[in-house]
Image: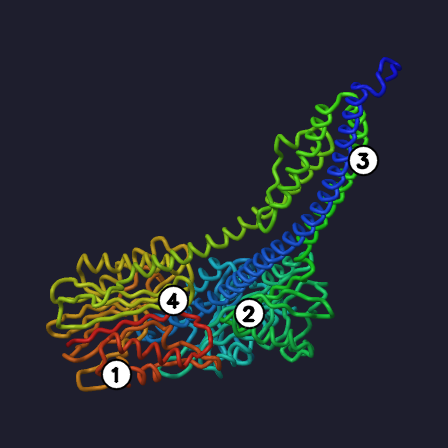
Amino acid sequence: MVKKYGLTLGGLQQKILNLVLVFLLAIIAVFGAVSFYQSKTLGDVVSKASDEQQSSIEKVSGETMQQVIESSMVKTNSLQAYIADDMFSEMKADVLTLQTLAQELFEHQDSLEPHSYYPPDKSNDGEFTAQVLWGEGVDFEHSKYLGIAAHMSDTMTAMCKNSGYLSNVFIGFSDGTLLCVDDKSANKFDENGNISNFNVLDRPWYKGAENAGELYFTGIEADTYTDKIGIECSVPVYRDGEMIGVVGVDLFLDAMSEYVEQSASSGGFICVVNDNGQVIFAPEGNGLFEVELSDSADDLRSSDNKELADFVTMALKAQTGLKTVTINDKEYYMAGSPMETVGWAVVSVIEKQVTEQPTNAMIAEYDRINVEAEAAFEEGTKHSQQTTIVMLALILILGTVGALTVANRIVKPVERMTKRIYEISGTDLAFEMEDIYRTNDEIEVLAESFATLSKRTRNYIDQITKITAEKERIGAELELATKIQADMLPNIFPAFPERAEFDIYATMTPAKEVGGDFYDFFLLDDDHLGLVMADVSGKGVPAALFMMMSKILVSNYAAMGGSPAKVLEQVNAQICKNNDEEMFVTVWFGVLEISSGKITAANAGHEYPIIKKADGSFELFKDKHGFVIGGMDGMRYKEYELTLEKGGTLFLYTDGVAEATNGDNELFGTDRMLDALNQDREADPKTLLSNMKESVDKFVGDAPQFDDLTMLAVKLL
């Protein structure tokens, strides 16, 4: 043994030193191999996890965005069509109200003194004023119609003032005269200051209503006095079966054009297609559709692009849902909904590529974060290697304990991170910071990068989930509204199981989630049964609210006693007090004396009842109608009586039955209604209503139901 530099060579000290050195070198070798393996494994896991996360995000985001777009775009398009069509529906309702009022006046003209009327006066320009116009060679001062029609002046003026869309209300007569209300009095004069001739009988709205014999919508016309584009709705007025004139309203379409223009956004817009398949409204520079005059405009239903032609054809008939249409090598999402009143359709368009931008942006952001994380990881690995060399030198000096401490400090967080990354899959995207990662080095930087990416991903998915939940909430509220409305109507049958003298059954099938029709029946005492059938103007939630108020008023006033006519007068007075929305309801109310079969009834503008005698067939009972409830304050109603024999049946209904329309635009009508009832004359009320519903469904086919179907039948046994 030789002693050198205080170290005994070849002795126990050297052997111990050699043993420690071998042990330390083995530890260093093992530690180096483990670090290399863990680093490579971590890199592979990070790369694999990144790919899986990107694929999962892209899939979940794409599917969720598709669902959101489909739900939002289809519902928004349907709402836009509903709002646009509601304007024409109100226009139709106003015209029918004026027709009813005009026919009432002319039926009672013998008891009316002629009302004063005047030609246009320039001083009235800017104010809604009733004025008379006439055609060339017509002597308006000797018209036999104007003095009676002038009684409508105040109603027509109020209708224009209170409407947000009507520009002109008028009634033209077969003698060439016209009574109209507008605020353009000065436009009625020519350059010489003379009142311009107005040839009533040549106007499209007059000839169209005369030829159709019913409600008529013109195409888009230029106004005679302002050159603004608009549409006119008109309907004939009859007296003793002879057409004496046509009543109608004008609607300027400036607001619709402006609304369509404002719809243009990045890659999306809405347009309006008429019943000829021509685009009549579209934002300027939309890149797809050009608005041209009707003579030169193309019919999109005949387009060489079959996808577009099929879509437009479908949109004019029914709601399309979300469709993909390729135009000029670009894909577009489209949704269409028909405007049933005028036969047009509203079409929503958005470029598909635009809808994919949020997903693409999120993937790009994800890639950026990954690149930064990888750079941080590589930088951290580089620093870690340098630290390892220093630590290995310290391990050689400090010994086994130091080596194990350093190894434990480096390897353990990496193992924990690797295990957690392996666990991340599917919708479990959570990576949270833990104390084990807080090493104040590159491992902590890498862990923070993963935690930040995980948090952003979960926040985005939470936002998508909230949007989906809101859509489900709205659907649930509409479903609840439908149930509440159904519960408001008598729906437990048999309704009076203890009464063997009669059988009664009723149904109501709304056209939308909630409807405006209602029926009711109730015992006023042991021998008197109250029967109600009613139809509220309009559809949807407003009509449903008005329906519930009307039903409660009728049943409450009926319970207080009084004749049917008196009940209707009380209900009308109550509704007219607070009817700022100018809604109305048609009501047939009758009281059946069960012991005798005598029915005392009053009719406020509702459909004719149908009655079957014990040994006969079903037939219309053409009673005399009063004015609708809510249409005019102070109305009086007349009662009448009819007898329901033992074994006889009374059938009540709303106009949704007779006016059910098939795909060819044909009405079901009263003749088919009577045929359906007479196919089994002795049927009980439930079977009778089932036969009627089956006949209506068979006639309508696949055509959409545009109005509520409500029926009630009572049979004396």
For residue 530, which numbered disc appears in the image? none
Whole-percent x and y of residue 493? 23, 67
For residue 618, which numbered disc appears in the image? 1
Tell me the quarter of the picture where residue 261 sits. bottom right
Query: What distance separates the C-alpha of mark 3 from that of mark 4?
Result: 72 Å
Query: What distance separates the C-alpha of mark 2 from that of mark 1?
Result: 40 Å
Sequence-first disc among 1 and 3: 3
Q: Which residue is mark 2?
A: 320
The residue at 30%/63% (across/down) is: 635
Looking at the image, the residue that sits furthest to the front is 1
Taking 111 as reference, is 162 left or right?
Answer: right
Sequence-first disc among 2 and 4: 2
* Between marks 2 and 4 in the image, the one whose residue lies nearer the viewer: 2
Residue type at mark 2: give it: Thr
Whole-percent x and y of residue 24? 77, 28
- Local packing at callout 1 (Cα closer than 10 Å; few below 14, some 14-19, many 20+) is many
Residue type at mark 3: give it: Lys
SS class, disc 2: loop
SS class, disc 4: loop
Tell me the quarter of the picture where residue 97 sits. bottom left
Q: Which residue is mark 3?
A: 382
- Could you tell me which quadrant the N terminus lies in? top right
| Relative vertical location of residue 361 with respect to residue 406 in this rendering, above or below | below
Q: Which residue is mark 4?
A: 510
Residue type at mark 4: give it: Pro
- Local packing at callout 2 (Cα closer than 10 Å; few below 14, some 14-19, many 20+) is many
* Between marks 4 and 1 in the image, the one whose residue lies nearer the viewer: 4
